[in-house]
Image (cartoon, grey):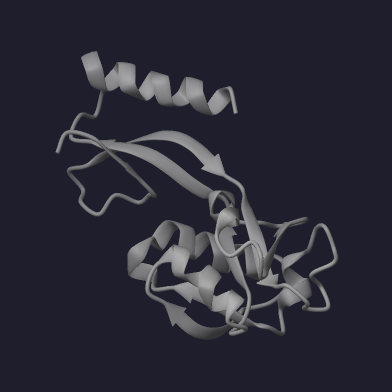
Amino acid sequence: MDLAIVRPPAPDPDIALHPLFDEPTLITILKGHPLSKRHTLKLIDVAKEPFLIFDRSLSSGFYDAIISACQQGGFTPRFGQAAPQIAATIPMVAAGLGVAVVPAYLRQIHADVATFHPISGPSPRASISLATLETELTGPSANFHQILLTIESNN
């Protein structure tokens, strides 16, 4: 494999990361929850709810960003059931098991039974990078990186 799109950090010190963008995150809660009618939420608004989060080994950078944002918001999350992957937190929210902080791209999953809310105040970012064995991108990999940056800047 020559290239991969990953969430930092790299799993191996020989892999170079070339930043692409930071994706915003959202709080997702069960539709019908007392907070579900609000457009934006602060992390502290859901501090008493069980936090559904994936195992840190799946994405330590994003996991740490969530915990850090909660602590900056004035609390340490009370963990609920662990999710086997990041996307699995949404069906767990839909099942009424707690709340989750997810990358914005996941807002389409279970949108009929879960609500998604922009976070005001301290909020984690879900970083995305291009991973390669090249510390300096050249040729096709440099072109691909530039295409991805251009696509993101147009969104």
Count of number-bearing discs: 0
Considering only vertical position in the picture, is 113 above or below 126? below
Q: Position of residue 79 (x, y in %)?
A: 55, 84
Q: Position of residue 136 (x, y in %)?
A: 26, 23
In what quadrant of the picture does the C terminus appear?
top right
Which percent across, then down, holds residue 41? 78, 63
Residue 82 position by quadrant: bottom left
* Residue drawn at 67 percent across, 64 percent down: 27
**Residue occupying image coordinates x 17% and y 33%:** 2
In-front residue for pair 38/113: 113
The quarter of the picture where residue 68 lies is bottom right
Q: Is residue 149 above or below residue 41?
A: above
On screen, residue 125 versus residue 118, left or right, reads: left
Q: Nearer the viewer, residue 60 or 140?
A: 140
Q: Could you tell me if residue 138 is visible in this image?
A: no
Image quarter hosting the N terminus: top left
Q: Image height check: is 131 above or below 145? A: below
Classify residue 37 by image quadrant: bottom right
What residue appears at the point 44 percent right and 64 percent down from the top-left corner? 86
Q: Residue furthest left?
A: 1
